[in-house]
Structure formats: structure tokens, C-alpha cells
């Protein structure tokens, strides 16, 4: 059996942490795109569409991310899609992030006074123009801090991909702990790396929030 | 091959699912009571405690809030035995959930406590109430009332997060779901049923707590 020095443990975890970062980025960017589409749908569509998007949000916020991962992993396989843990994790986390982001952004848009919509409508701007030129720039200012804050939740959420067998930071930690018989040390290092990823983002979100007030 | 779903083979396993749901609610209840208490103590120290304690509580809150729950759970269940602390899956789950909820509750409650008007505390002190009395009778109830919705959301999040505890073989709802799919190989259907049960529990717990708050926790 190979001997693991502290450096070996640390280096292997760092390699795996790249996958945590990659998964976080995919989920965050994918979630933003889907979330924005849902937001536009919700604002422009009728009450039925609004209710449907609301149900979508409720579904993802009211169930465990772990179950969502399992569902997608096994569901996609059942539909005949040849899936891997990486694809399933990407899709599940993207949908999960989109539900939260669309809800956060809806709140920001709702915070813009109705008069802004009405004023831009009276200037004969179309819905797309109203949203893009009048509402979005104002809502964006409000949205930055909570959106950055949510990124922390996405990074922590990627840890659950380890359960369906995707080798990211947590899974790598488990594997190394099994080889070295030093779970305490390994999981401390894993926690430290998550902290190193998340804490700066948390701090930045807090700075942004303070700047807004 | 056409898609064939067979939910009946899941429904007949309802005793297992019920047992899992009871476990999930039980774990959440215990963690809420312990974590809530921990949160109140920490929030008090964060606002009124001596400087080193304030710093220590701050570090605890940041450490927990910036690491995933599953890592906290694995650290407690797999890591602590190295120090000779061997916990059963259920106890490790409760400990992890308590520590996790405690950190979030600290931050939530602190906001409520800091929002207490100075005059109310001075009025209470002028009535010769002790420091502890001022906190429990004057500061805490309105603080709890103010942050109750945020606290309820956090409790629901912790309950949903407890699905991970099945990974260390705590026999809660996700464990039951896994067990069923390993028996009849109906993975997709059992996860649909399990997920819907979680959704039902989340809605139930949320409305129950929203109802119970004004009646039993902080008064109207």
C-alpha cells in the first residue's frame, strides 16, 4: 500500500476540488440561464404560467437536493438516456439553482415600483424593451448581493453529487479516508477547502449587501 | 421499450415509508429543540458576551455556514471515532443537525435581538429586572416573533438536508426509499414517491410551525 503523506492527501484533494469548482460553475451559469428564462416567462405570461413556475419553484425548494439527484440519475437512465454521474449532477444542480435564482430575481423585480412599468409602457415600449431597458438595470442592482450569496449554496450543494458517485471534493475525501485510515485529518482538509471556496464568496456578498444600504 | 411505471410495488411498502417519515420528523424535532436552544445561547453571547466568546461564536457560525452539511456529518460519524468518540448513526445525525441549525439560528436570532429598541431594555432595567430576566422576558419574545418566518424556513431546510443522514444508515425517509428500490429495483418510482413525501412533510412542518409560533413560542 502506498504511503500517503499530508502533502499527498492535500494534493489529491486539490485535484478533486477542481471538479467541485467546475460543477459549481456549470450549475450556476446553467441555473442563471434557465432561471432568467423562467423569470421572463413568469413576467410576460398569464396567471396560469405564473402558477406553473411557482409550482416548479415550490417543488425544488420543498424537496431534498439529494432526492432530486437520485431522481434525475435514475430517471434519465429509465428514459433511455445514457447518463453519467457528471451529466446527472450537472442537470440536477442546474434545475435546482434555476428554481432558487428565479425566485430571488422575482423578488428583485417585484421591488421595482409599478410606476416604472407603467411609465415605460406609456412610452410605447414593448414588453421586451420595458424589461431590458427600464426594469432589468434597476433590478440587477438589487439582485447582485443575494445572487452571489446563493453561489455559496450551490458550491455546498455540489457535495451531494458525491452520493451518486461523482468524484468531487467530498467523494475524493471519502476515498482517501478509506485508504489512509485517517478520516479525521482528511475530512478536516475537505472542510477547510470548502471553507476556502465559500468564505470569500460569503464575505463578498456581505460587502455588496452593505454597499446597497 | 415503452416506459412502464409501477407505483403499486412502492405503495405496498407503506409501513417502511411511514417509519422513515416518522424518523425524519423525529430527528428534525429533536434537532430543532436542541439547535434552537444552542442558537439562542450563541446569539446572546454574540451580542452581550465577552469579546473572546463573541469571536469564538462568530468563528463557529462562519465555519458551519461555509461548509456542506454532508462533510459535517461525515466528520462527526467517521472522524470523531479516531478520538475515541463513537456515535450511533442516529446520535451522529442529531448532533450534526443540531450544530448545523444552531449556527444558522444564531445569525437569524442575532438580527432579531439587535433590533430591540434600547428604551425597552432601559425600561426593564429600571424595573430592577436582572440581566437574565431582561433577556428572557423583554428581548427574546419580540425577537423570536420578528424572525420566526426565517427560522421556520431554516428548520425546513435542515429537515430536507437530513436526507443525507441515510448515507450513514440512519433509518430516515431517504434510507427507506433506498431500501425499497434495492428490494424491487423500481428506483425511479420509489424516488418519486420519496420525493413527494418530503414535499408533503415540508409543507406540513412549515404550516404547523407557522401556526404554533404565535401560540406557544412567543405569544401574540
Image (cartoon, helix red, strand yellow):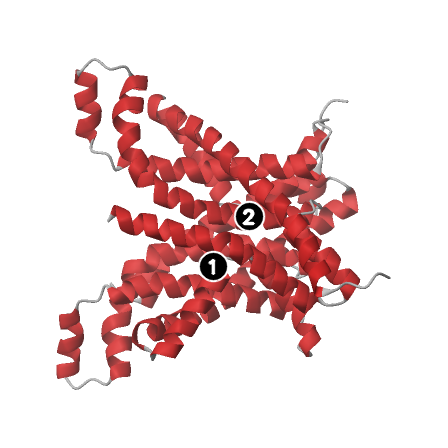
Crowding at dot 1, Cα within 10 Å, few <14 / some 14-19 / many 20+, comes out as: many
Q: Is residue A106 visible?
A: yes
x then y, percent, for residue A164: 69, 45
Quarter of the figure that contains the N terminus of chain A: bottom right
> As displayed, is residue B126 above or below residue B88?
below
Horizontal and vertical percent position of residue A198? 49, 53
Locate residue A10: give its quadrant. Answer: bottom right
Camera-nearest residue between A71 and A98? A98
**Chain letter behind tag 2:** A
What label does residue A73 carry, if any? none
- When the figure is inspected, residue A203 is found, relative to residue A3, above or below; the finding is above
Image quadrant assignment for residue B196: top right
Location of mark 1 (residue): B65
Asked if residue B109 lies left or right of residue B158, the reply is: left
Q: Is residue B37 visible?
A: no
Residue visible at 20% across and 33% down in the picture = A113
Name which residue lies at 42% across and 71% down: B57
Dot 2, crowdedness within 10 Å: few (<14), some or many (≥20)?
Answer: many
- Taking depth in this image into account, of A57 and B63 the one nearest to the observer is B63
Circles 1 and 2: CB atoms closer than 8 Å: no
Instruction: Give the camera-side residue of B112 and B79.
Output: B79
Percent across and percent down for residue B144 are 31, 64
- Where residue A66 appears, x then y in whole percent? 60, 47
Describe residue B16's horizontal placement relative to residue B53 as left or right.
right
Q: Is residue A71 above or below residue A7?
A: above
Q: Which residue is mark 2?
A: A157
Q: Residue furthest front?
A: A7
Amino acid at each position: 500500500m502506498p504511503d500517503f503523506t499530508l502533502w499527498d492527501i492535500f494534493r489529491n484533494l486539490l485535484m478533486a476540488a477542481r471538479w467541485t469548482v467546475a460543477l459549481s460553475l456549470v450549475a450556476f451559469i446553467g441555473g442563471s440561464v434557465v432561471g432568467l428564462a423562467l423569470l421572463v416567462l413568469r413576467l410576460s405570461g398569464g396567471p396560469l404560467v405564473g402558477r406553473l413556475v411557482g409550482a416548479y419553484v415550490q417543488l425544488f425548494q420543498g424537496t431534498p437536493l439529494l432526492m432530486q439527484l437520485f431522481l434525475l440519475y435514475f430517471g434519465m437512465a429509465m428514459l433511455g438516456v445514457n447518463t453519467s454521474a457528471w451529466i446527472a449532477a450537472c442537470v440536477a444542480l442546474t434545475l435546482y439553482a434555476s428554481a432558487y435564482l428565479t425566485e430571488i430575481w422575482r423578488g428583485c423585480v417585484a421591488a421595482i415600483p409599478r410606476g416604472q412599468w407603467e411609465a415605460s409602457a406609456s412610452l410605447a415600449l414593448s414588453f421586451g424593451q420595458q424589461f431590458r431597458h427600464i426594469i432589468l438595470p434597476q433590478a440587477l442592482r438589487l439582485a447582485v448581493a443575494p445572487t452571489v450569496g446563493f453561489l455559496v449554496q450551490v458550491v455546498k450543494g455540489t457535495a451531494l453529487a458525491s452520493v451518486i458517485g461523482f468524484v468531487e471534493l467530498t467523494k475524493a475525501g471519502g476515498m482517501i479516508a478509506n485508504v489512509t485510515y485517517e478520516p479525521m485529518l482528511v475530512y478536516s482538509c475537505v472542510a477547510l477547502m470548502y471553507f476556502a471556496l465559500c468564505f470569500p464568496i460569503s464575505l463578498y456578498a456581505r460587502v455588496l449587501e452593505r454597499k446597497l444600504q | 421499450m415503452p416506459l412502464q411505471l409501477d407505483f403499486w410495488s412502492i405503495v405496498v411498502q407503506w409501513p417502511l415509508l411511514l417509519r422513515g417519515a416518522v424518523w425524519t420528523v423525529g430527528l428534525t424535532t429533536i434537532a430543532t429543540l436542541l439547535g434552537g436552544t444552542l442558537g439562542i445561547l450563541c446569539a446572546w453571547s454574540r451580542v452581550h458576551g465577552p469579546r473572546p466568546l463573541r469571536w469564538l461564536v462568530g468563528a463557529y457560525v462562519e465555519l458551519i455556514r461555509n461548509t456542506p452539511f454532508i462533510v459535517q456529518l461525515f466528520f462527526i460519524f467517521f472522524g470523531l471515532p479516531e478520538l475515541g468518540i463513537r456515535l450511533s448513526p442516529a446520535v451522529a445525525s442529531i448532533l450534526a443537525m443540531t450544530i448545523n441549525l444552531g449556527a444558522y439560528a444564531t445569525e437569524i436570532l442575532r438580527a432579531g435581538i439587535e433590533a430591540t429598541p434600547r428604551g425597552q431594555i432601559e425600561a426593564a432595567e429600571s424595573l430592577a429586572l436582572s440581566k437574565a430576566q431582561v433577556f428572557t422576558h423583554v428581548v427574546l419574545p419580540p425577537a423570536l416573533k420578528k424572525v420566526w418566518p426565517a427560522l421556520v424556513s431554516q428548520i425546513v431546510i435542515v429537515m430536507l438536508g437530513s436526507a443525507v443522514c441515510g448515507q450513514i444508515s440512519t433509518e430516515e425517509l431517504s434510507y427507506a426509499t433506498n431500501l425499497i428500490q434495492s428490494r424491487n429495483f423500481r428506483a425511479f418510482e420509489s424516488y418519486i414517491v420519496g420525493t413527494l413525501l418530503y414535499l408533503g412533510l415540508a409543507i406540513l412542518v412549515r404550516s404547523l410551525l407557522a401556526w404554533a409560533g404565535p401560540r406557544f413560542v412567543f405569544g401574540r
